[in-house]
Image (cartoon, grey):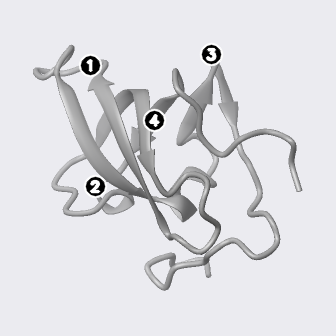
């Protein structure tokens, strides 16, 4: 298990529409608050509040539920300007939405 957190405040997320609940487009957001699920192993989603960093909605806040499996895919989480990949800890949920599960 990695000592690195799956997600922290300040991370930039590069999400496809399928990576978040009711996703209708790809988004790039900077995480400002972790609301729920980040510290509960059996939960398959994390509720995240963040700010759009590009596009027509740049600067606007958004609350979304992100699938944990998406955060483990290379290139999705960027921390301090570098990509981060964190393996699932033992006992962590694997949801059936994950095509790689």
8 or 13: nearer the eye? 8
Mark number displayed over residue 17 = 2
Q: Earlier in the sequence, mark 4 or mark 3?
A: 4
Rendering coords of residue 8 (x, y %)? 59, 32
| The C terminus sits in image quarter | bottom right
Going from N to C along the chain, the mark reached first, 4 or 1, is 4
**Image position, residue 59 (x, y; %):** 21, 14
Residue for badge 4: 13
What distance separates the C-alpha of mark 2 from that of mark 4? 12 Å
Q: Would you say the residues marked 3 and 1 are in contact, meaning their CB atoms lie under 8 Å apart? A: no
User: Taking 87 as reference, is 93 left or right?
Assistant: left
- Left or right of 65 on screen, residue 101: right
Q: CA distance from mark 4 to mark 3?
A: 11 Å
Instruction: Give the vertical position of 56 relative to 40 (above or below).
Output: above
Mark positioned earlier in the residue sequence (3 or 1): 1
Gap between marks 4 and 1 measured at Cα: 12 Å
* Discs 2/4, front: 4
What residue is at 31 percent from the left and 18 percent from the top?
A: 53
Residue for badge 1:
54
Q: Does the residue at mark 2 contact the one at mark 4 (Cβ under 8 Å)?
A: no
Q: Residues within 10 Å of mark 2 (few under 14, many from 20)?
A: few
Q: What residue is at 50 percent from the left and 57 percent from the top?
A: 37
Q: Which mark is residue 81?
A: 3
The secondary element bearing badge 1 is classed as loop
Identify the residue at image location x=26%, y=19%.
54
Q: From mark 3 to mark 1, how far is it between C-alphas? A: 16 Å
């Amino acid at each position: 298990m990695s000592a690195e957190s799956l997600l922290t405040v300040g991370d930039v997320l590069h999400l496809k529409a399928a990576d978040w609940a009711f996703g209708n487009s790809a988004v790039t957001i900077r995480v400002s608050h972790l609301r729920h699920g980040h510290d509960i192993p059996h939960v398959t989603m994390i509720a995240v509040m963040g700010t759009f960093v590009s596009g027509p909605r740049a600067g606007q806040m958004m609350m979304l539920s992100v699938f944990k499996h998406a955060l483990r895919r290379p290139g999705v989480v960027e921390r301090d300007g570098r990509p981060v990949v964190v393996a699932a800890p033992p006992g962590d949920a694997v949801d059936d939405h994950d095509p790689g599960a």
